[in-house]
Amino acid sequence: MQSDERLTIDTPEQVPLELPLAGIGSRFLAVAVDTVLQAALYLTGFLAIMFVTRVGAGLPALLGIIALAGPALFLLFAFCVYWGYFAFFETVWSGRTPGKRVANIRVIKESGHPINVYEAIGRNVLRAIDFLPFLYGVGVVVMMLNRHSRRIGDFVAGTVVVYDTPTDQLAPNWGGDADGARPSVPMTGITAEELQLIEAYLQRRVDLDSWVAHQMGEKIARRITEKTGVKPEANQSVDEFLERIARSVRDGARFR
């Protein structure tokens, strides 16, 4: 169930990006998977603590301590799973939880940048309110009343949920080609402003969410290809292609 709504990001490079916003169906699939995994964690923790309690109960000196600590340890564990599960995975997996990976969606900032630990915690602290009165009733209503399908937690953290698309692992080498044998590309029609656009992207890509940066690079590459007719070589990443174009233009020092 894919939403037709899109988020348009106006970048400093003047390359507007349109990112498909995740719909309610995809987000419910993600939270359903995550809820099942949370339940599995609760059960695993409960069984582990029960096992430790029974083993310790056989030792008279520890009987009283373990009898008191067992329930407290489980409550502490359950608290960490409930409040920390989403924030932890969204921080270490670039805005994705296991459920979001299954649904092919991710959380990013409205600016297109990846979220940090503070945004991850902020949007998930409000999850308890979005869940009210049950099954995310408040969250669904709020999502239906705004064009970017944001729940209360998203408004607080300044985030949106978009559809994700897998991209190849990029390993660009802006300093030069590894083999030093790649020929220069003859460029005609590239303006100084377009060269500045390419170089601005190459400098800012590390600050953007990897998926957003890839989308931006693709759009710039298509623009260059349409204007010059030069296409990426086989097995050449978008970043490598743009680096080669910028290097060729700089070497030729010819602008229209």
Image (tube, rainbow, N blue to C red):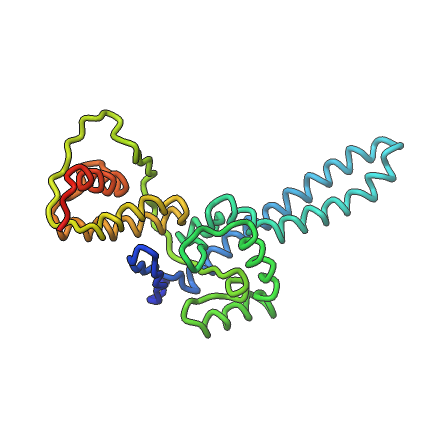
**Coordinates of residue 223 in the picture (x, y in percent):** 19, 53
**Coordinates of residue 19 in the picture (x, y in percent):** 34, 59
In this view of the protein, which residue sits in the foreground, 107 or 242? 242
Q: Is residue 247 left or right of residue 151?
A: left
Say which residue appears at 23% left-offset and 25% top-offset: 179
In this view of the protein, which residue sits in the foreground, 94 or 209? 209
Query: Residue 116, relative to residue 22: is it above or below?
Result: above
**Coordinates of residue 153 in the picture (x, y in percent):** 54, 63
Query: Residue 3, relative to residue 97: is it above or below?
Result: below
Say which residue appears at 58% left-offset and 61% top-offset: 127
In this view of the protein, which residue sits in the foreground, 128 or 156? 156
**Coordinates of residue 14 in the picture (x, y in percent):** 29, 58
Say which residue appears at 17% left-offset and 51% top-offset: 191
Q: Hey, which residue is sitting farthest bottom in the picture? A: 145
In this view of the protein, which residue sits in the foreground, 132 or 233? 233
Say which residue appears at 50% left-offset and 69% top-offset: 140
Q: Is residue 129 left or right of residue 46?
A: left
Quadrant (top left, top right, bottom left, bottom right) of the N terminus: bottom left
Q: Is residue 60 left or right of residue 32?
A: right
Q: How many marks?
A: 0
